[in-house]
C-alpha cells in the first residue's frame, strides 16, 4: 500500500506540472485553440485572442494551485505518516479547485478585453 500511495502522489505531481505547462503555453501563444487541452469554453474558444487572453488571466490560479499541489505531494512522499488516501484526495481537490477557479478568471479577462475594443 505505501508504494501505491507514493505512485499516486507522483502521478498527482505530474498532473500539476502538466496543467501549469499547458496553461503557460496557451497564455504565451505556443498552444493554440484545440479540442484537447486548455480552457475550452465558448468564451475562450471564440477567437485566438480570446484564447490567449483567457489563459493569461488563468495562469496565476493555475500556477498557485499547481505549486501547492506539488509541495503537498512532496511532503506526503517524504513523511510516511501523511501517505494516506485522504492526503491524495486533498491535493486532488487543490489542483482541481485551481483549474476550476481559472475559468471565471479567463472569462472575466476575455469579456473585459472585448468591452475595451
Image (cartoon, rainbow, N blue to C red):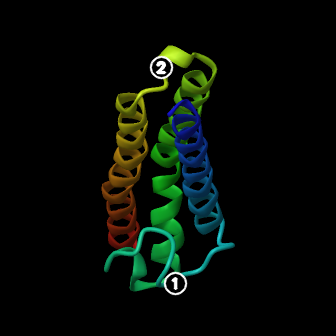
Q: Which image quarter: residue 91? A: top left
- Give the structural element (helix, strand or loop) at label 1: loop
Q: Which image quarter: residue 110? A: bottom left
Front label number (2 vs 1): 2
Q: Position of residue 26 (x, y in %)?
A: 59, 68
The front one of 39 and 54 is: 39
How many numbered marks does the figure carry? 2
Q: Which residue is mark 1?
A: 34
Residue at horizontal 64%, vertical 57%?
21
Q: Position of residue 15 (x, y in %)?
A: 55, 52
- Give the structural element (helix, strand or loop) at label 2: helix
The front one of 55 and 96 is: 96
Residue at horizontal 53%, vertical 45%?
12
Q: Which residue is mark 2?
A: 82
Residue at horizontal 35%, vertical 30%?
86
Q: Is residue 5 above or below residue 113?
A: above
Q: Position of residue 115 (x, y in %)?
A: 32, 70
Q: Which mark is residue 11?
A: none
The front one of 90 and 50 is: 90
Amino acid at each position: 500500500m505505501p508504494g501505491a500511495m507514493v505512485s499516486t502522489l507522483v502521478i498527482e505531481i505530474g498532473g500539476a506540472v502538466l496543467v501549469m505547462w499547458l496553461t503557460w503555453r496557451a497564455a504565451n501563444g505556443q498552444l493554440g485553440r484545440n479540442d484537447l487541452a486548455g480552457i475550452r469554453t465558448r468564451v475562450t474558444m471564440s477567437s485566438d485572442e480570446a484564447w490567449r487572453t483567457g489563459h493569461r488571466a488563468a495562469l496565476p490560479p493555475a500556477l498557485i494551485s499547481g505549486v501547492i499541489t506539488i509541495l503537498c505531494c512532496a511532503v506526503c512522499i517524504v513523511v510516511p505518516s501523511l501517505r494516506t488516501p485522504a492526503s491524495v484526495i486533498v491535493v486532488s481537490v487543490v489542483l482541481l479547485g485551481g483549474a476550476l477557479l481559472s475559468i471565471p478568471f479567463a472569462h472575466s479577462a476575455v469579456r473585459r478585453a472585448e468591452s475595451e475594443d
